[in-house]
Amino acid sequence: MHIHNQYQAPPAPPPARVPRQVPAGTASFENRTAELAELDDWLTPGGPGDPESVGSPRIALLSGLPGVGKRATVRRWVERARDRFPGGQLYVDFARLRREGAVGGDVSEGLRHCLRSIGVAEEYLSGDLAELTAHYRSHSADRRIVVVLDEVSQPAQVRALIPNAPGSVVLATSRDRLGELMWDGARLMPMEPLSTDSGRRLLARLCGEDRVRAEPEAAARLVEWCGGLPVALYVIAARLAVHRRLTLSALAGELADENRRLAGLSPGAGSPGFGGPDSYIGEEHTVSAVFTVAYRDLPQDAARLYRLLGAAPGRSFDTGGAAAVGGLSASAAAPLLGALERASLLDVGEDGRYRFHDLVRLHARDLADADERAAALARAMEYHLTGAAFADRAIMGRRLRIADHEERMRQAGPDPFGQAQGGGKQAALAWLEAERADALAVLRAAAAHGGMDRQTWQLAEALTALYLHHRHLAEWIESGELGAGAAARDGHPAAEARLRALLSRPLMDLGEFERAGQELETAVQRADEAAAAAPQDRRLTLLRGSVREFSGRYWDRSDPARAADAYDSARALSAEAGDERGVAIALYFMGCSQSATGLHEDGLATLRDGYERLRALGDARMAARAQAAIGTAYEALGRTADAVRELTGAARALRAEGATHYEAQALETLADIAERTGDAEALRRHLHRAVEIHVAGGSPRAPELRARLEAAEESAG
């Protein structure tokens, strides 16, 4: 007699995601032979710094002036060594993270980016820095990767992102030398500007050997005045390429005029002081002189757009955003953007968004007058506020909001997300994600400018549609603080209450509970003040209920009884305002709190009420969460059969809704019940699916659950 074991083996991890994130290098890369050879010696198997024989990842830091070729050198080395890294390539631009508001949290955001890139789901990225670092090391332990970190400013940004797999490599670029990284075994490689011969070869490669050979003295002067900076040579070559009749001598004469005004245009850019504030200022002026030459060749309308885009907050924009800042139609803006791109004053990425090099943006901004700067900010605010208003409606539907955007959206025309392929909600989230850094830059600029407080808090409120779905906690906090401050200055207590209540969410996610409590205390006060001033306004009654619901979530962690009171108050206020969903949600949270305090019968009744209301409203996702809580309450009461029935139904519904994180929670409770009751088959079945969910999402709990499943399989024989 043969017994066939029909149980499935623990699910294998999904095929590893192999990211290829390092941007391509430039086609006209020149020289850097010594730097590439040094990298080969330090990083290549079989070389003096053989990482395989040492058994640990190797680190190299290339430092130097902006535009000196650090990134190009790193990218060229990665291109040549691509086959050495079967685990892929990770890329983090810390300058971008700093610009996007991650100051103080850019290391955590860099870790989250890398974890996302190798397949870890959003719901498992909420830990603190130590937890994220440990999670990253675990996920990188079995994959040989190359990690490129651009514009690092502190050693911690490198240390946190060192992978665990032998043979892996970290390549970092920085304006600073960061000597502390020597303690981590890093090779420090300061990069000097190109030599005169290398600069000449690069110029010849870019604009033609014949032109350089015909005017050797002028070519030498051009290379000299570029200070060995490839970025400056590229701008010169672009002008020579566009204007074929322009001679090197004529262009050198123009640069000589600029050199008289800009002392920074000299071959001493790489002299002592390298990497410090003084040399950075000199570098900026050097490149500014070259960019001015290119700017003078622009048509008048392209030059105007260049100035306005430089004056606008943010670092990137699509055609629509550029058109808005320029006060143009998209069809009128497109050829002007093309002209700026051809002049090497703008780059366009694979995502279709245009970007300035930082120093080019400063050059364009400095050319704008006061009126142009004010106009650029006002138009950028209008563009982002209108887009965010449409996105907020597409994502959040009829949820509570203080700002009324109906007239704004009516005047703007058709809903851009109304006919989007794949659903308006997803298209709206994608747009907000693409614009989030620039929207935050607009918030900062508007808050500092003065006179735009109302638009500032309205934009901050609309952006929460993104933050409630995607975890950008540092940005959410800054946006909420800017918005709440603007609402207070605007004398709008309702908006201040809404934003401070929302602000409590990211603060609690980061463990800043004291600050979260302070924000909620102020939110309750402001909401009550607003309602007292306009007692007939239904929205303000809803607001009072909403801030109390947020307060309940705050008290859940430390005082369940007080949380239950807050939820009961939220329920009563929602009922007063006629908001059935608000009542149902408050009942759900209140029932959970009641059960947590041991009032299981009361909690069960409250949860049942909330569940039925959510079902009637067609909110399948929240109804399934309530059903799972009902099952948990039944289990606490010892009603095992009822608990299994409700939890099984909830897990099925949550899976149908794509809410797998909550499905896994229900399955773990079912597994606990099965283990307690001795149902070995059910234990393995529930654990198998729970492991599958956690593995697919990159959850840090996946190994723990897998071990539990393997133990259950072994017990079954």
Image (cartoon, rainbow, N blue to C red):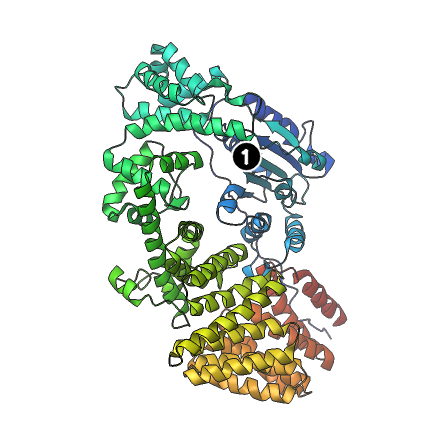
**What is the crowding at mark 1: few (fewer than 14 residues within 10 Å), some, or many (at least 20)?**
many
The answer to whether residue 566 is above or below residue 290 is: below
Which image quarter is the N terminus in? bottom right
Give the camera-side residue of 649 and 292: 292
Check the image and report above or below for 222 versus 519: above
Question: In the rendered image, which quarter is residue 211 located in?
Answer: top left
Q: Nearer the viewer, residue 618 or 251?
A: 251
**Compared with residue 554, is residue 223 higher up or lower down, i.e. above or below?**
above
Q: Position of residue 365 (x, y in %)?
A: 37, 38
Q: What residue is at 76 percent from the left and 71 percent from the top?
A: 715
- Residue 82: image quadrant is top right
Q: Is label 1 in a helix, a strand or a loop?
A: helix
On the image, the x and y values in percent for residue 77 come to 55, 31
Q: Residue 640 at what x, y percent from top left?
A: 66, 86
Residue 413 seen anywhere in this rendered image of the structure? no
Q: Residue 425, position in %: x, y?
A: 39, 64
Type of the residue with mark 1: Val
Give the labeled residue for mark 1: 78
Pick the front one: 89 or 91: 91
Q: How many marks?
A: 1
Q: Quadrant of residue 674?
A: bottom right
Query: Which residue appears at 66% of the width and 55% of the height?
Result: 131
Residue 256 appears in the rendering: yes
- Side of 194 where 46 appears, left or right: right
Q: Residue at x 38, y 25 (%)?
A: 290
Instruction: Look at the image and tell me in which quarter the C terminus lies.
Output: bottom right
